[in-house]
Image (cartoon, rainbow, N blue to C red):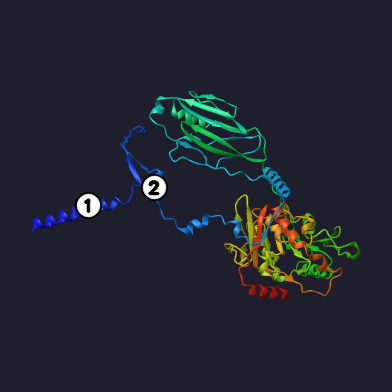
Amino acid sequence: MDGQAFFVKFVVFFCGSFCGHILTLHFPTTYKNYKERFDESSGYDIEAVFRPLEQKQDYPIQLYPIATNDLKEMPCSMCYGHKLKLSSAEKNQREASLKRHERRRLDLLDVELKVDGSSPLSYPAHGFHVKPMRAVWLKGLRVEWFSLDDLRSNLMLKMSADRGIFKLVGLAHGVVVTGNSTNIITLSTRTPSLLNYQLKYIIYKNTIFDTNIVDQVLIRYKTFSATLPIHIHHIQLPWLFKYKTGQVKDRVTVIVKTFLRYSRLKDAIQSVDNVHPGTRIVVADDTPDSLFTNFQSSNVDHFRMPAYQGYFAGRNLGLSQVYTEYFFYIDDDMEITKNTKLELLLSFLDKTNFHLVSVDAGHPALSSIFIPLGNKTHRCFVQKPYPGYYHEIADMPGFFVNDAPVNAFLGSTNEVKAVGFDPHPTLSRKAHEEFFLSALGRLRIATCGHCSVRHMKKKGSESGNYKTYRYGDTISKNRTHYNLYMHNIECQSINWGIPRKMRMSNRLKAKDV
């Protein structure tokens, strides 16, 4: 029995080994054993190193579309809205204007940092910051390992810059340095420890002024190289605000743009006085002189504009007169109520990094997000009102991140001033998302479901026939063409995302508010 058992076990072992060998033939190896000579550190003896196969030796992997689809840019062909059509002269003019814009931008160029996994160079990958025409100590530069041949040969490390020079703080004995106080410096020595010691005593000084730019310092050691970014930029000074009691009236200015609708303006001003008495109100008014009515008072500054200057021009005028940290903008047919909760909105902007937060004005379709399509040269945007937000803000229930809220919002004065409202005549009668397109990537915008303003019901005919100036046959077409040209967009459309019947129902509800 013992002989039979041994024979059975042997057969099973042989069959298992043979089957395992056959199976492994169908699976390519991912590592190979390289037997060659290596320069190991002192005290170590390396006989073999397992290295990953070259990319060309990789076997194919089935890709998951659910993941790869996230990498794809959505083409402009998915935009079914207004298309930009330009003549040859207009195309040339827009291209020249775009080049001037790119030259003046203060945004940093993308700095591509590639690090070789086997590189002996060690350095701060995030780089350094330096003020224009000043110096910074390049701390953290070193060579991490050396080969046996390095112990018997001359070591050399070279650094070069485009917008500055390198200076020695001190010279280590046994190190030869060439190019001190130039934009190319070379260190050479036969002692590895001295090379790292000398690297501790080098500074970079900016010599070519720019208010905001990156100098990419190139480090070369043997066959290895690395890029060290040095961010040259001026200090950006803050603009701080003082206030007395911390109440709404001390920290917020209300801005109202009006045209002809004085009966509604009167109610809007009264609503502010009722809820937040003493709050300063700035009224920008481009009503013709023959129909002008003065609302100047102790807390109302009524600014007269040339007639028919328009919506955004009025907003800009109002914003230019604000000297509080925040402002609250409403149209002249809106009223502030206790449900507006300016204190809650103030607390939100104080505690977060958002620049602007809007409230409900009775029309959910006016709050939306922008979905970018295309690429760097052909941009398109789809405006999506339902849902008109990305997600709820953590630890802030009822507050949602979005791109384009309604025309009733609390904003941080300085940041919104930096974007501004375009006073172009094309936007004089009607404008909304134009400001938020300009604010993309510049302002963090949110909307609050807990807060609201009251949209006034229509009060008969307004003097001067407001609708005649507000709407026109060609205004929508001209406005769309202007938006596409100004923002270098090829197409813009609205994806409602809900049935038409539901849209009409929401519109009817908004009219009743």
Taking the spot 73% from the left edge, 48% from the top edge, the residue there is 89
For the C terminus, the quadrant is: bottom right
Residue at image position (48%, 60%) is 66
255 or 7: nearer the eye?
7
How far apart are the two marked residues, 2 and 1, measured between alpha carbons? Answer: 26 Å
Q: Position of residue 145 (x, y in %)?
A: 42, 34
Earlier sequence position, callout 2 versus callout 1:
1
Q: Secondary structure at mark 2?
A: loop
Residue 173 percent across, percent down from the top left: 49, 23
The reply to whether residue 233 is in sight is no
**Nearest to the observer: residue 149 or residue 71:** 71
Q: Residue at x 46, y 31 (%)?
A: 222
Residue at image mark 2: 58
Secondary structure, mark 1, is helix
Q: Amino acid at mark 1?
A: Phe
Residue 135 to residue 333: above or below = above
Q: How many marks?
A: 2
Q: Quadrant of residue 270?
A: bottom right
Task: Give the quadrant of residue 73.
Answer: bottom right
Where does label 1 land, which residue? Answer: 18
Q: Is residue 489 visible?
A: yes
Q: Is 373 or 209 nearer to us in this picture?
A: 373
